[in-house]
Each structure stands twice: as C-alpha cells, then as structure tokens.
Amino acid sequence: MLNNWKTLLDDRNRFFWVLQAAGWSGYALVHYIGSLMHEMRDIYALILLLGAYAGFLLTVPLRYLYRRIWDASPWLLIIVVLAASYVSAALWAVVDNATYWEIYKFGFSPDSNWFYFKNTIAKFYIMLSWSGLYFGIKYYQMLQDEKEKALMATSMAHQAQLKMLRYQLNPHFLFNTLNAISTLILVKENELANRMMSKLSLFLRFSLDNEPIKKIPLERELDALRLYLDIEKVRFDERLQVNFEIDEDVQKALVPSLFLQPLIENSIKYAIAKLEEGGEITIRAQRFSEDLLITVADNGPGCTKPLETLTKAGGVGLANTRERLQALYGKNYSFTLTANKPRGFRIEIRIPLEQVEQA
C-alpha cells in the first residue's frame, strides 16, 4: 500500500489527475448533501454533476497556462492567475445557467441583472481556490525535490568522507611488510615469505572488497584482523601475543569494516615495538545493555602525553577511527582512552548493537 502511494506521488501527472477527479467529485458531493436540506428535485443531482464536470474541464487549461508562466515575475503571475480565474469562472457560470435552462425547461429568469455577476463572483472564488491549491502543491513538490537533492548531496559527501577515511592505509604497514618479505627471500626463507605474501594478498583483497559505508559482522572483522596479525607476527615472532575475548552473543554484531586494524597497529607501534621482551594485546567484545562494547588494551609503556590530545594528532590511527565512528553513528557512540592496569594503554569503543538479519 505504501509503495503504491509512493509510486502515485512520484508520478506527478497521474497525481494531478487523481487530485482533480477527487476534488471535483468532492465538490459535487458536498453541494448535493447541502441540497438535501432544501427538498430539491432529484434532477438537481444531475445539474450538480454537470456543473462539477464543467469545472473539471475548465480548470485543465489553467494547469497548462500556469506551467507556461511558472518562471514569470510575481506580479505577472498574480495578474494572470486573477484574470484566468475570472474568465474561467465566467465561462463556468454561463455553462451552469445553460444547464439550468435546458434541464428545468421553465424559462429560467434571474431576479435581477446582478444574478449573473454574483454567480460569476462565487465561482471566481472557487477557481481562485483551485489556483491557490495548484500553486501550493507545486511549490510543496518543488521544496520536496530540493530537500531530496540536498539529502542526496549530503549522503554522497558522507560516503566520500567515509571512503577517504577508510582507504587511508598506513604506508608504513605496507612498507614494513614488503621489507620483511624481501628479507625473508634474501635469507632463503622462501616458504615463510610466500606464506606472508599470501596473507598480505588476502588482507588487501578483504580491504578492497568491503565497502567503507557498509558494516560487516564482527566475526568477519576479526578474521581480517587475524590476517593482519599473522603478518605482523612474522616480524615480531614471539614478542607479539594477542588474546581474543569475544562473547558468543556478539559474534554477529555489525561493525565498520577494518576499524580495529588501526587500533591494533597503534598498539604494536607504541607498545610492542618499544619493549625488548615484547608485549600482549587483548581484544574484548561484549554486550553492554543495548550497545556493543569493544576494548583494545596493551601492556606497553603507556603514554606520557595527555590522553585527550592523542586523537587530535591526525593520521590513520586513533583520529581516523574516531572520525569514521562519528561519520557512521553521529553522537550515538563513545570512544575513550584510558591508562591500562597495571600498565599500558586501553581504548574502549561503544556503538549501537546491530545484529545481522537472519535470512
């Protein structure tokens, strides 16, 4: 039903004819109900129908006239509308009087010469009302069109922003990975180099196949994250330890694609890489009321800078992730940075819990 109504509204020509027929049918019905109070003859219903039909036909040319002068100056529009409404009303009054004469056949004669003028003025107000409704509906449709265009432009700008943020792959990651593969080939570790290249290929394919404006299940996001971590583990070996603590009921929760990778990359760069003995990263995901709470914590040396200044530094790490979340969720998210206990750095992200729809 809603789709049929939307289709009708989108087809402006059909919408006009539906309103035209409904409006003049309503006019005839209202006048007929009013005539029942005055014990009018049954034939009066036919007169009302013919009068409404005449109004229906006489207002059709007004539509095409108003289309032609739509872009004219306001004063010219007012003059044309008043003149066209009065001429149409006068013609309608003539047709109406002729209908009375032909149907009643009793030599219809007005009480005074003012009868025709008063009848014309009454119909002039009706024609003027029709013209006002026509312009009102047309202006409303134009405003709706402009609103849709503005929304579309905003949506396109929003998508462009998301794509820009999403495709800002850290060149250091690619450089370090390719450099590690090159080193493995030089030391004849061809099998390990080939495995690392395969992981890199799968990770990059995943990043290109998933649109930044769409969300993916958390389990797929974690699969991509494991690909990234497998590549990094070749570089850090036993120095990099990663723990996943993912609740079963949030495995299907929808999240932005590859939004965790910059956070893990940040932990590796500022925590694991700075410790000779290496370090540990813990990734937790759990339900928090009606939200999804994700925590990324490390046991690195922490940060000496004020935590509130970290996300303003730019780049593709914390600032990038926060901007993507803001673009996707507006104000309905939180992104907090705290010190981890007993040491290290903790990032907590809260977003609305949206589950994958079951087929």
Image: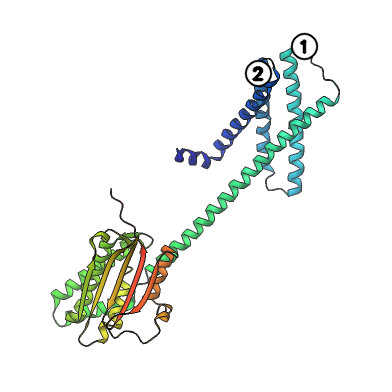
Q: Which quarter of the figure has residue 261?
A: bottom left
274 left or right, relative to 113: left
- Mark 1: few, some, or many residues within 10 Å (few <14, many ≥20)? few
C-alpha separation, residue under disc 1 versus residue under disc 2? 17 Å
Q: Nearer the viewer, residue 128 or 153?
A: 128
SS label for mark 2: helix
Q: Is residue 316 visible?
A: no
Tag of residue 106: 1
SS label for mark 1: loop
Q: What amino acid does circle 2 point to?
A: Leu
Name the image colouring. Answer: rainbow
Horizontal and vertical percent position of residue 344: 29, 82
Q: Nearer the viewer, residue 24 or 44?
A: 44
Horizontal and vertical percent position of residue 299: 26, 81
For marks 1 and 2 on the same chain, the one whose residue lies earlier in the sequence: 2
Q: Which quarter of the figure has residue 122?
A: top right
Q: What amino acid does circle 1 point to?
A: Phe
85 left or right, relative to 293: right
Tag of residue 22: none
Above or below, comparing residue 320 to residue 220 in the picture: below
Q: Residue furthest top?
A: 106
Above or below, comparing residue 307 to residue 82 in the picture: below
- Mark 2: few, some, or many residues within 10 Å (few <14, many ≥20)? some
Q: Image quadrant for the N terminus?
A: top left
Tag of residue 46: 2
Horizontal and vertical percent position of residue 181: 21, 78
